[in-house]
Amino acid sequence: MNRTAQERSRIAPEVAARYEAVIGLEVHAQLQTQTKAFCACSTRFGDPPNSNTCPVCLGLPGALPVFNRKALELAIRASVALHGEIHERSQFARKNYFYPDLPKGYQISQYDLPLATGGWIDVELKGETKRIGITRLHVEEDAAKNLHEGFADSDRWSYIDFNRCGMPLVEIVSEPDIRTPAQAYEYLYALKQILEYAEVSDCNMENGSLRCDANVSVRLRGAEKFGTKAEVKNLNSFRYLAHALEYEIERQIGALESGGEIAQETRLWNVAAGRTEAMRSKEFAHDYRYFPDPDLLPVSAPQSLVAAVKRAMPELPDAKRARLQQEYGLTPYDAGVLAATRALADYFEASIRAGAAAKSTASWISVEMLRRLNDAGKDITACPVSPDALAELLAKIDAGEITAASGKKVFATMFETGKRAAEIIASGGLLQITDPSAVENVARAIIAKSPENVAKYRSGNEGVFKFFVGQVMRETRGQANPQLVNEVLKRVLGEP
Ligand code: ADP
Ligand code: ZN
Ligand code: MG
């Protein structure tokens, strides 16, 4: 048995139950500016390698950085959205280390005087709200990107793309308030949503705009002291975060149970192997020799600027969900679904303004529309059905022009073709059948074809009634008024 398999040796649930995990997350989010943090190079993603570079972000001697005002504004926006205390005066510091992706030999970051301290995020789990504290938020620059190619020893290449070097980031450090992988997941989800709502970052995890490191330790339940923590890097999806934490918690409990100790170390999540692996221990921890960057003035965040950012702050997720419930009588669940993104909530409210009723709009969007968008791999902003086209369709269903069943078909066609409901209904002959004699003709034909089921019904088997309803609906392609079908069938089947 190899070492990792031993490490993972399954922990009995009653043993695991004696322990509690303690987790703190460090999240990096790229600020959505046009230009880099300290130079005028473009931040565009996907440009040819090394095309967006200049003496500043290439770390050439003598080049001087100038802090991007928009980056400051966005970092303040993030701090406000996270309820942090913004310091009027903060400072850039040099974090010194050598790595090929860091041409200056130091990263410009903030250390003892960060832009903001304190704050919190409320996360909702199983109907309970848990407040997770935020320790600090600081601004820093990103490093370049290393790319490795080839496997044979004689033919291995490494490349560096400096386009990413100098991108503006905020690092948001949480308090060790998180207790389960599920809470960590919800915290990251809520943080991402807030940063997206506030238009601080596009939070695209695939492009690396949002990255997460997790610190985790375990302790016996009831113990006051925290255990020794490991830091797991490279958790760039929600799934990896949850899996890595589950793995790491079990590994640490296993080590303690077998009389071992937890080494304070940095670990990596190995996606392919599904395990965390030691990367470097704290014995080799860097001493970064931080000192104030003499090239940059202290960062000034005057109250007037903070006030202006507050005034311009869009409605944030918590407020949006609360308002959707109050204003439209939505359930907390529906409000949560519709407020998933600002664009989706905007779509919902635009439909209401176009005359649709809140309850049915909420359910059509969250069921029919989200499913189709998901299947088509489309975002709500690219939805082929406009809010007023949806409102028009719902009005036709409400008015009884078409049945709800036909409505779904019409919606499907609207989604596929971009046509309006009226046109589809007219050309498809989908108008609701409300003529009792038409329904009766269909009902009689079906009854005549199913003498056995008729006999069952007459001998008291109420269940077969549904069979007849289903048959009539099918025969009328969902266009018969369902209530009418019920009435007619009851009458005709009740005949001696
Ligand atoms: P370091 O000095 O090693 O960077 P910090 O005190 O700055 O450690 O904390 C980094 C992150 O680790 C924070 O998110 C914090 O909440 C979390 N953390 C601190 N101590 C523990 C612990 N014992 N177990 C789990 N997480 C912890
Ligand atoms: Zn540059
Ligand atoms: Mg730290």
Image (cartoon, helix red, strand yellow):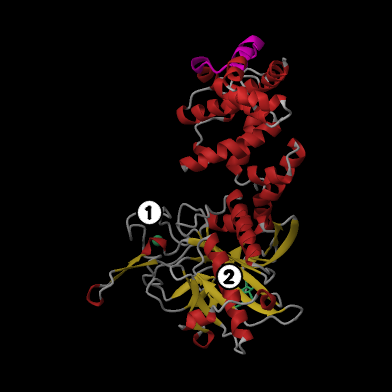
Of the 4 image quadrants, the one containing the C terminus is: top right
- In what element is the residue under mark 2? helix
Magenta part of the protein: which range? 426-443
Q: Earlier in the sequence, mark 2 or mark 1?
A: 1
Of helix, strand and loop, which mostly describes the magenta segment?
helix
Image: 193 above or below 385: below
The image position of residue 187, as x and y in percent, is 64, 61
Q: Which mark is on residue 245?
A: 2
Q: Nearer the viewer, residue 428 or 419?
A: 428
Q: Which mark is on residue 46?
A: 1
Q: Nearer the viewer, residue 15 or 28?
A: 15
419 left or right of 317 in image: left
Residue 432 is covered by the magenta coloring:
yes
358 left or right of 92 in image: right
Indicate the quadrant where residue 212 lies. bottom right
- In what element is the residue under mark 1? loop
Q: How many angstroms separate mark 2 from mark 1 (CA)?
A: 31 Å
